[in-house]
Image (spheres, rainbow, N blue to C red):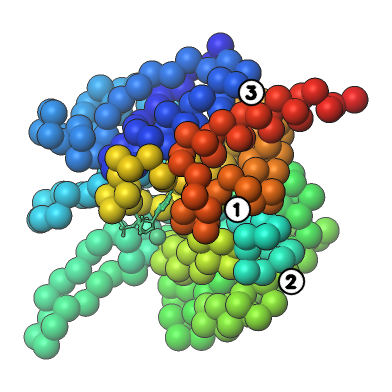
Amino acid sequence: MTDIVLLKGDGIGPEIVSATKKILDAAGADLYYHEFDVGQTSYEKTGELIPQATLDAIKKYKVALKGPVTTPVGKGFRSVNVSLRLAFDLYVNLRPAHSVENISKFGNVDIITVRENTEDLYIGEERKTDGGWEAVKRITEKATDRIIEYAFSYAAAHGRKRVTCVHKANILKNTDGLFLTRFREIAAKYPRILADDKIVDNMCMQLVTCPEKYDVLVAPNLYGDIISDLIAGLVGGLGLVAGANLGKDAAVFEAVHGSAPDIAGKGIANPAALIEAAVMMLDYLGKKEISEKIKSALLKTLENGVCLTPDLGGAATTEEFTEEVIRNIYTFVETRP
Ligand code: NAI
Ligand code: MG
């Protein structure tokens, strides 16, 4: 059995976490779940968004599957996601997105976004000036090198052919200039992978006109945030896309959408993105056979289109969708040679 930390989160979090857990168990993932609260639910119980016990558990077990959390409105609350990234130096934000037949607006999309997760404008340093405010965009050699190295080694390990650097170095000559220069230097160590770059505005235009041409994208934090949501839109929306936050000593897997308070408790949330996150987690844990089983059952459920949740135009409940994925896991097992 493999120990993992399970963070239920807020809003639809507990519903989709419980659905995902059922699927993991049905597929035989052999996991032991250490369940903890984070976010608003935790704040109401303990006065903390991330209690020390939760941090200690992630430190101990190193892998967490996390439901979405609500960041309470008001000053002084740092988002749980940002806190976790900082606490465990989760410097990679990996967001794969692929087309699903009958659902995605675009066919043939299969793009991995590798987003830098620790610096850029997200350090949140803003200061008052005479006529307004300014914000610090921090780009360091250390963070740049490790994210670009990660993008190329990921591409090499997964048979990917092309890595594209997304930047605005024509305007931000030093910060994005550093990112682009290091990209070109590191690319030279990977002669079998095509390396090119695109200015971020042109990248957006390219992605909505010919997304099938792109493979792995590597970007500083802000551009990575924006383009990965744009790509999610190309393949069917936030309800389908997962993300992994990876560091040397810990990994947190999650859906990219939020806690959807408007539909919480109604039993109609789409668990697909969190199931995708669980698939990424199983790959990370080396449980490739189980992850393939779940991945193909999820894809079949989505492509069949007979049991979809309302966000995808269907009328199924979270439970019905989950049961359908489980049925497809069992057929997958039975039809294997
Ligand atoms: P949201 O992603 O929660 O919801 C946007 C819209 O998409 C809503 O209409 C919602 O019903 C729908 N939606 C999202 N996920 C869905 C799913 N799995 N199935 C069906 N419909 C789904 O974004 P919103 O409303 O801006 O944020 C709500 C809360 O979530 C905020 O407190 C925000 O801070 C937090 N949030 C947390 C994230 C995380 O924990 N990773 C990421 C983004 C937002
Ligand atoms: Mg975002």
| Residue 83 location (% of width, % of height) | 28, 44
What's under tag 2, amino acid-wise? Lys
Q: Residue at 80%, 23% (x, y): give it.
A: 334
Between marks 2 and 1, how big is the CA–CA gap? 15 Å
In which image quadrant can residue 206 be found?
bottom right
| Other-residue count near label 3 (Cα within 10 Å), few / some / many at <14 / 14–19 / ≥20 | many
Mark number, residue 96 = 1
User: Residue 257 at what x, y percent from top left?
Assistant: 41, 53
Pointer 1 residue Cβ closer than 8 Å to ligand 2: no
Q: Which residue does the image show at 75% across and 28% down from the upper left? A: 331
The answer to whether the residue labelled 2 contacts the one labelled 1, judged by CB atoms less than 8 Å apart, is no
Q: Which quarter of the frame holds ligand 2?
A: bottom left
- Residue 318 location, x and y as percent? 46, 39
209, above or below 301, in the image: below
Amino acid beneath label 1: Pro
Residue drawn 43% across the image and 80% down it: 172
Residue 203 locus on image (x, y percent) = 58, 78
